[in-house]
């Protein structure tokens, strides 16, 4: 426009008001101008405007043939003018030509874009442009998209061609324009309003915080469901929000208190989350039951949050807390999908702990439905993760794998980085693979990712899954010592979780039993409970059918397992095992174990037909689901049961049972035997597993309790015995010899 003015000698006017005509003028009409009208007077008038900007009187002049229009094609350079490559890179814009033809510094281009191209753009347009520059596929309403340079007519989701030349400069120009608007209270409020309208809640809150408008920032936080902010925008965004508020507000304002608590939970510190609530509301926050029922004393959001905190707490819940928690649901508006989904998700976790799997699956469906309506992928991810765990407890790794796949799809939709949640999925996938016969992913996770996992957000059911599968995998593929060391590490990491302590002790009892150290296991178990003792279980003083507490049930099973191995001819033992199998709270792993022990007892009592029938049924059910690790846990009993040729011949008649028994053998000691056939020691086998999983010497040393120098010594012997010279060659040779799967 300046060049045109210089060439014609006509004055150049910029603004919404038309110039006074006296011999002609050039009028640069800014975008979004309102009330513009053709001026009176004589002489030529050159108008530069966007098509959507109205000018009163222009249509009348056009009807009378007084208007000559020049569209974009006439004003832009084309292939013929500057060549196809330059035309594509500049989008035909003359002002961008220097940026791609010569080594022009960024300063002049940025200043032009800021002071000329962006002049007159309203706050909401600038904010929309900033978002599109960051994410061309962002959902921007048509009214905010209209009139934007580059993006106005561009196909949604595509990057306009001219940005190849001026993208970085335009980003800087937009940033500077927005920053200049933030310098005044009114400008900051307008920018924040535009950011909130586009769903940029953390940015809107930061804009108001920087302007000192903490009240306005609080209103935006509350409007965006403050205690769910972390699920919508991620932990880093929440950290930035909390850092922007004054300490006194962080300590007193309920939305901020809840944000601080959930932030602590996501960093694996549930005790800190509880302490944040106690510091603000008093010691009653330790009693979740009291808080839930105190409708007149605490706000509804606070009572809901205190119940949700049970999801991560590992302590025993008070009686009736789940039943009474449904009063919160009656207070939740029907249209509040976020809180209704969160309620069902919390109940889901608690039902799984109590082995109420049918009810857990039902509430999982309800949570999934509500979360789908709010379209927050990370929340749907948690539901699918829980449903996968349910299927593992039910002994169905194939169904668990399908839910884990759905969880992975939800994680792919999350728009912020969430490494802790990815680790949860990685662990679950490794446990599913282990149940299906592949130990490598789980052993690798335990050697490389366990410490980070322990420091992050975890639920008791996930910890239980990890303890069960982790201790079994290490016991089978490394050693009983490695499994006990793993349990000790977790015992130290979770000193505050009483339920974890008992669970860890029971897993240690099982590790000792599987290592044929039955008396040592009995001594360990004897100190765990006054209610479930060797004498009480042995004398039938415990109602095995009615047991419902997870730890009592697991300990009673340990004693029954002890009797089945050490005293299989004990009077009444078959009846006790049969009673236990009627218990509705057993997991599939526990039920399969009980069936195999009973089959073993029946065989020792010379009730061979009953033993064979029960064993065939149990093995057939596990084979149908592909549950290898469930059977692997009972390898010591299966070895006795299948030790005679007659039994093996009967079992081998069923293809599925024959295959699953071979898989059980190959997944554990079978590989060790093949290794020994080729001269490999147990330590060399452990190191072979480690290098097959990609572990470093340091990681292998840490996992199996050796020095790094000792690992190197065993590794050199391994190379010699396999006639190879590298880790890759060793793994390849071991696979060829079927030492590795």
Image: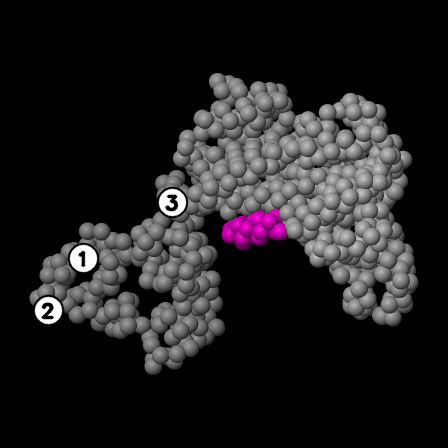
Query: Tag 2: Cα neighbours inside 10 Å, few (<14), some, or many (≥20)?
Result: few
Q: Nearer the viewer, mark 1 or mark 3?
A: 3
In the structure shown, which secondary structural element does the residue marked by tag 1 occupy?
loop
Residue 636: which disc?
none
Q: Which mark is residue 65?
A: 2
Relative image position of residue 665 (x, y in whole percent): 79, 54
- Residue shown at 72%/51% (left/top)? 628
**Between disc 1 and disc 2, whose residue precedes?**
1
Label 2: state its secondary structure. Answer: loop
Q: Which residue is mark 1?
A: 55
- Magenta region: 398-418
The colour scheme of the drawn protein is one colour
- Alpha carbon distance from label 1 to label 2: 16 Å
Q: Is residue 593 magenta?
A: no
Q: Earlier in the sequence, mark 1 or mark 3?
A: 1
Question: Which element type, helix, strand or loop, lies under badge 3?
Answer: helix
Q: Position of residue 607 (x, y in %)?
A: 81, 40
The residue sitting at 56% across, 22% down in the picture is 291
Give the quarter of the image for residue 612: top right
Viewer-side label of 3, 2: 3
Residue under circle 3?
Answer: 197
């Amino acid at each position: 426009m300046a060049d045109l003015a210089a060439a014609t000698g006509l004055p150049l006017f910029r603004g919404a008001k038309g110039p006074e005509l006296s011999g002609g003028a050039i009028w640069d009409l800014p975008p979004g101008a309102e009330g513009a009208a053709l001026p009176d007077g004589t002489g030529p008038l050159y108008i530069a405007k966007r098509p959507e900007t109205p000018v009163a009187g222009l249509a009348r002049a056009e009807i009378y043939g007084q208007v000559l229009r020049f569209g974009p094609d006439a004003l832009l350079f084309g292939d013929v003018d500057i060549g196809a490559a330059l035309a594509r890179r500049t989008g035909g814009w003359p002002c961008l030509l220097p940026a791609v033809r010569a080594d022009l510094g960024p300063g002049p281009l940025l200043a032009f874009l800021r002071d000329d191209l962006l002049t007159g753009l309203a706050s909401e347009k600038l904010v929309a442009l900033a978002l599109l520059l960051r994410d061309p596929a962002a959902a921007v309403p048509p009214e905010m998209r209209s009139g934007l340079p580059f993006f106005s007519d561009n196909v949604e989701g595509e990057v306009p061609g001219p940005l190849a030349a001026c993208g970085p400069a335009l980003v800087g120009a937009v940033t500077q324009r927005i920053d200049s608007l933030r310098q005044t209270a009114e400008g900051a409020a307008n920018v924040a309003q535009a950011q909130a309208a586009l769903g940029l809640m953390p940015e809107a809150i930061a804009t108001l915080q920087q302007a000192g408008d903490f009240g306005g920032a609080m209103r935006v936080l509350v409007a965006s469901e403050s205690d769910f902010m972390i699920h919508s925008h991620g932990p880093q965004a929440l950290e930035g929000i909390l850092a922007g508020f004054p300490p006194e507000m962080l300590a007193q304002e309920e939305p901020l208190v809840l944000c601080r608590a959930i932030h602590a939970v996501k960093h694996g510190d549930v005790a800190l989350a509880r302490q944040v609530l106690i510091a603000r509301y008093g010691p009653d926050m330790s009693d979740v039951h009291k808080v839930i029922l105190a409708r007149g004393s605490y706000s509804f959001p606070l009572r809901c949050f205190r119940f949700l905190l049970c999801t991560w707490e590992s302590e025993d819940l008070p009686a009736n807390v789940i039943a009474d928690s449904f009063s919160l649901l009656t207070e939740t508006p029907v249209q509040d999908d976020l809180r209704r989904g969160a309620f069902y998700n919390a109940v889901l976790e608690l039902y799984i702990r109590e082995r109420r799997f049918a009810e857990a699956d039902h509430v999982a469906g309800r949570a999934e439905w509500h979360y789908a309506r709010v379209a927050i992928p990370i929340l749907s991810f948690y539901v699918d993760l829980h449903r996968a765990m349910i299927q593992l407890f039910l002994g169905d790794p194939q169904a668990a794998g399908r839910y884990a796949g759905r969880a992975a799809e939800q994680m792919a939709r999350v728009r912020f980085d969430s490494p802790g949640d990815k680790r949860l999925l990685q662990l679950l996938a490794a446990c599913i693979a282990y149940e299906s016969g592949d130990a490598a992913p789980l052993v690798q996770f335990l050697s490389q990712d366990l410490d980070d996992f322990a420091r992050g957000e975890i639920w008791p059911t996930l910890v239980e899954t990890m303890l069960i599968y982790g201790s079994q995998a290490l016991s089978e593929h490394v050693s009983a010592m490695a499994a006990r060391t793993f349990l000790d590490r977790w015992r130290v990491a979770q000193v505050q979780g009483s339920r974890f302590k008992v669970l860890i002790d029971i897993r240690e009892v099982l590790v000792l039993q599987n290592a044929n150290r039955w008396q040592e296991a009995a001594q360990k178990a004897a100190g765990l409970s006054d209610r479930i003792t060797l004498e009480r279980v042995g004398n039938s003083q415990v109602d095995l059918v009615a047991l419902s507490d997870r730890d009592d049930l697991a300990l009673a099973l340990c004693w029954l397992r002890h009797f089945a191995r050490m005293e299989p001819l004990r009077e009444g033992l078959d009846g006790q095992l049969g009673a236990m199998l009627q218990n509705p709270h057993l997991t599939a792993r526990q039920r399969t174990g009980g069936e195999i022990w009973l089959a073993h007892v029946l065989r020792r009592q010379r009730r061979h037909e009953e033993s064979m029938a029960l064993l065939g049924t149990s093995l057939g059910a596990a084979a149908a689901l592909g549950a290898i690790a469930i059977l692997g846990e009972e390898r010591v009993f299966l070895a006795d049961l299948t030790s005679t040729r007659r039994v093996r011949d009967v079992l081998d008649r069923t293809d599925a049972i024959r295959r699953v028994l071979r898989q059980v053998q190959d997944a554990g000691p079978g590989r060790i035997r093949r290794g020994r056939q080729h001269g490999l020691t147990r330590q060399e086998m452990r190191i072979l597993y480690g290098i097959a999983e990609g572990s470093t010497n340091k990681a292998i040393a840490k996992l199996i309790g050796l020095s790094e120098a000792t690992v190197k010594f065993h590794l050199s012997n391994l190379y010699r015995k396999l006639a190879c010279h590298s880790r890759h060659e060793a793994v390849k040779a071991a696979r060829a010899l079927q030492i590795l799967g």
